[in-house]
Amino acid sequence: MRRAVQVEAGDRFGDMIELLHVLERGSELAAPRLPALSIAQRNPLLLWQLLSLVLLLALIVVLARR
């Protein structure tokens, strides 16, 4: 899409057919998408902090009911 809106005329598509061809077949030329990472892989520290917070809240609830 960046090529379609370039400032310099020479950097844009030559005609509509070329643009349509790229739009229709672009996914074949694009780099493959990386698989989505889980929160444990993206930010393990945040995972453990959230887990600790949940356990702390559960402990507080259990102790408050005694």
Image (cartoon, helix red, strand yellow):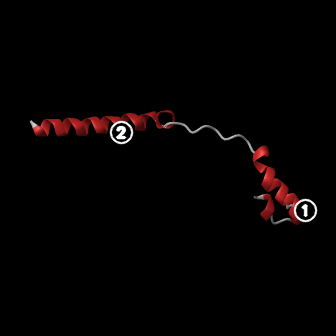
**Mark 1 or mark 2, which is nearer to you?**
1
* First reached walking from the N terminus: tag 1 or tag 2: 1
- Dot 2 falls on a residue whose secondary structure is helix
Amino acid tagged 1: Gly
In the rendered image of this protein, does residue 2 appear above or below residue 38?
below
Disc 2 marks a residue whose amino acid type is: Leu
Residue at which label 1 appears: 14
Question: Picture coordinates of residue 15 (x, y %)?
Answer: 89, 64
Local crowd at mark 1 within 10 Å, few (<14), some, or many (≥20)? few
Residue position for label 2: 50
Q: Is residue 52 left or right of residue 28?
A: left
The residue under the point 81% across, 66% down is 7
Image coordinates of residue 42 in percent, x first then y, are: 51, 37
| Quadrant housing residue 20 | bottom right
How far across and down, in percent of the image, does residue 46 sit?
41, 38
Q: Is residue 40 above or below residue 5?
A: above
Residue at the image point whose x is 47% and y is 37% from the top: 39
- In the rendering, which numbered label is found on residue 54? none
Q: Are marks 1 and 2 in contact (CB under 8 Å)?
A: no
Residue 18 locus on image (x, y percent): 88, 58
